[in-house]
Amino acid sequence: MQSVVSPGTYCSPGGPQIMSKRGVLTFNKFRQMYQDFWKPPPPKPPYSHICQIGDPVLRGKASPVNVEEIGSAKIKKIIKTMESSLKSYKAIGLAAPQVGVPLRIVVFHFPEDALKTFDEKTLKIREMETIPFKVFINPAMKVTSPNKIRFPEACESIKGFSADVPRFYSVKLTGLNENGKKVEWDAKGWSARVIQHEMDHLDGRLYTDIMDKDSFSFGFWHNVNIRSGRFNLSFSPYKIFS
């Protein structure tokens, strides 16, 4: 069977090639160049998605926010994006590095409807409670109880996995809100755990650094088995897996 090629090309052992002023382009190279030309530019932080483990932004130490910039369009955009991502991913806490911004900003939110997805036993054991939307800029944390509690913990930046993680029982968080006003939060139980988790993000730490390694588990391993490996985990907030 004879191959059909367009004018300006010729066949070679490597497939169709295109003559150009600079030499010869393989068809695949030309196609890639064409696709790259029409490809939209990659998004810039703050992202509407959550950065995943391996991204250098998650391992660097976040920089303090210039107090004079609080209330600026730049900081407002970062906080608005974090709030949107926090709610769309149904997360409890989020740190700015998770949306690609290496600044010391954390947000929290755990509404009543999210609380109701847990059974009474879990709520009681973990001491879970609702958290109104909170913003802390340049936060500082003080441990108020040396006792450590171990519970399963997950992270949107380590999608699909969880592990048992030891955390201090209670802490006090201080900082500035989105209006530059001083705020503080005395937290215990699950709220204290969430605070410690997000504060770790600001210093380039992940729960995998302190987890019980034997408890590290992929939450959808059973789905992988029943689908004979035909399983795709989505990193979009609107679709968990396919």
Image (cartoon, rainbow, N blue to C red):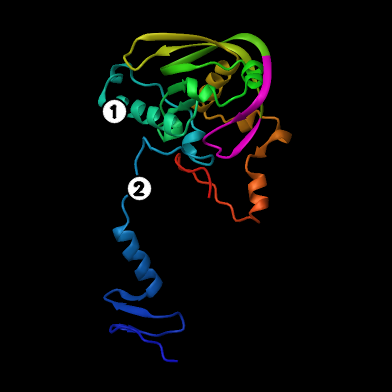
Q: In this view, does 7 lie above or below 20?
A: below
Residue at mark 1: 74
Q: Crowding near pointer 2: few (<14 within 10 Å), some, many (20+)?
A: few
Residue at screen point 44% across, 29% down = 86
For label 2, the SS is loop
Residue 206 image offset from top left, x and y in percent: 57, 31
Q: Please check the rendered image and state whether residue 112 is part of the magenta-colored stretch, yes or no.
A: no
Residue at mark 2: 42
The part of the image, by quadrant, that contains residue 120 is top right
Residue 154 image offset from top left, x and y in percent: 59, 31
**Type of the residue with mark 1:** Lys
Q: In this rendering, would 106 be left or right of 200?
A: left
Q: In this rendering, would 116 be left or right of 67?
A: right
Q: Please check the rendered image and state whether residue 150 is part of the magenta-colored stretch, yes or no.
A: yes
Q: Is the magenta stretch mostly helix, strand or loop?
A: strand
Quick one: label 1 or label 2, which is nearer the N terminus? Answer: 2
In this view, the residue in front, 203 or 42, is: 42
The part of the image, by quadrant, that contains residue 126 is top right
In this view, the residue in front, 34 or 162, is: 162
Give the position of the N terminus as an image quadrant. Answer: bottom left
Residue 66 image offset from top left, x and y in percent: 33, 20
The answer to whether marks 1 and 2 mark residues whose Cβ atoms lie closer than 8 Å is no
Instruction: Give the tally of numbered discs.
Output: 2
